[in-house]
Image: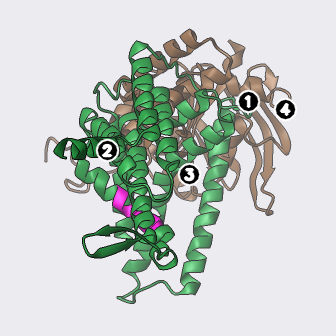
Chain colours: A green, B brown
Amino acid sequence: MARIETSFLDIGYLDTLSGQNTSVHRLDPRTKLLTTLVFIVCVISFDKYQISGLVPFALYPAVLMTMGNLPPGFIFEKTLLAAPFALFIGIFNPLMDRAILMHLGPVGISGGWISFASIMLRFALTASTALILIGVTGFNSVCMAIEKMGAPRIFAVQLLFLYRYIFVLADEASRVSRARALRACGSKGFGIKIFASMIGQMLLRTLDRAKRIHLAMRCRGFDGEIRILHPMKAGGRDVCFLLGWSSFFVVMRLWNIPQILGSLVLELVK
Amino acid sequence: MSHHIVEVKDLHYTYPDGTAVLHGVSFRITHGETVGIIGANGAGKSTLLLHLNGCLTPQAGVVRIGDFPLTKKTIEQVRRTVGMVFQDPDDQLFMPVVHDDVAFGPLNLGLPPEDVEERVENALATVGALHLKDRPPYRLSGGEKRAVSIATVLSMSPSILVMDEPTANLDPKARRRLIELLKTFTHTVIVATHDLDMVLDLCTRTIVLKDGRVVADGPSPDVLRNEELLDASSLEKPLCLQRCPICNGKTAHRY
């Protein structure tokens, strides 16, 4: 359980990072969200054997990370945490798709391996960029931006509540689990019976808490609609950021610049 | 100023599972009074508080806040008058940042944004938490959370402040700060608590509940010195009225 505690603390750390005051942090959350969406759409829309075309896209997370003063090691580590999901999606490609697509010297590389590498690369790009987005914007502001851009309010509010109470819940879960561990006298694992009753306990506590929160909300005039005061102002800098990066992404998406550069160099050498 | 009056007459309440908690509670609290409600666990303190701003509606008897008897129709009005601070700040602070939480009530009252901002600033300044404005609630210490919880209610400018165990889980210094803060309020303040020293320090009047009935209601110094009464209600004299365990009754400076 100690692991759960520390990983939740880490989410908190991402929040601390988002409180910095750099030029990227000062941008309007909507700008960063939109730009990141364009980025993600461009990255995923490549065909499945593409690798070289993806490489220039690494510039965006790298620049954001540097300008936003985020520790690369931390982002790398968090991205790695989610890597198994992508790994399982791609792992069967090399087995299914054995047609040799290219040769590296005497070794033939099958299409499966290339598409696997492409999946992993896309995953690394999109996951790290999403993390960086939160690191330079803050989860709450991202939610607000989603709402301001016209997503259903209930959706944004649910996300906000989730983020607010995930810490309280994790805290409660770790306390329950610690209480069990202290009286477990060394026996490892929960056993399905204990686990079931613990989960039940957590559910009941959560329901109770939800009831109390609802009461607290009603006491302050809650009538079903959550009103949030958050003026967002987008200026010229935001427009430049959005247009600049988006056009970069679109250009990189339409023309495979590394390949063009490569063949240019080859021509010159000839 | 009749809207600061809290009157409870012959209030009865039984929970849906059959537990009868209140058996005819009656009292009347007037403008500007600071009242402590004390009693053993399960004596009905929290249930009583929940009636004061309509979280529960009376099954028998009347709760009157100012000019309004508490009914489903007057509930909104009553909630504007009575500010309730819950025991667990994690229940009270549900918004992502402190500022939004303090602004939640005024926004629901339909105030214009400039007024809301002003109220948020004032409420946070009153509890000395203006510097916490942009912090997420889960990053605050216990004392800070408590201060902000109070601000969330103050921003609605209630005439009556109701608090459930305000000093629970606070370190001694934070507790002291809270008491000093509450002393500065001109509102009618009603606190339910086990912290009898705070009651003696803060409240001019004390109501003792036992098994859902009022067994004593009077000036705090009188009630809290009545050992027989306190003992019968599973309470004991506030520590500051007890003998010093080290010098056995001699005053501290002589020790």
Q: Which of labels 3 and 1 is toward the front?
A: 1
Mark with earlier residue (3, 1): 1
Residue depicted at 29% across the width and 45% down the height: A263
Residue B37 visible in the picture: no
The mark nearer the N terminus, 4 or 3, is: 4
Q: Mark 3 points at which residue?
A: B229
| CA distance for labels 4 and 3 | 34 Å
Mark 3 to mark 1 CA distance (whole Å): 24 Å
The residue tagged with tag 3: helix, strand or loop? helix
Q: Residues under labels 3 and 2: Cα distance?
A: 87 Å
Residue A81, magenta (yes or no): yes
Chain of residue at mark 4: B
Q: Is residue B234 left or right of residue A24?
A: right
- The answer to whether tags 4 and 3 share a subunit is yes
Looking at the rendered structure, the number of numbered marks drawn on it comes to 4
- Measured as percent of width and height from the top left, residue B242 is found at 35, 50
The range drawn in magenta is A79-87
Sequence order check, earlier mark of 1 and 4: 1
Where residue B71 is drawn, which disc sits there?
Answer: 4
Q: Residue at x 63, y 21 (%)?
A: B107
The mark closer to the camera, 4 or 2, is: 2
Q: Which amino acid does label 2 sit on?
A: Pro
Badge 3: chain ID: B
* Above or below for B121 versus A196: above
Residue type at mark 1: give it. Answer: Glu
Instruction: Give the chain of mark 2.
Output: A
Q: Have a look at marks 3 and 2 and say if they share a chain.
A: no
In the drawing, what numbered circle is on residue A87? Answer: none
Q: According to the image, label 2 marks what residue?
A: A258
Q: Distance between the residues labelled 1 and 4?
A: 14 Å
| Residue A112, image x, y percentages | 45, 71
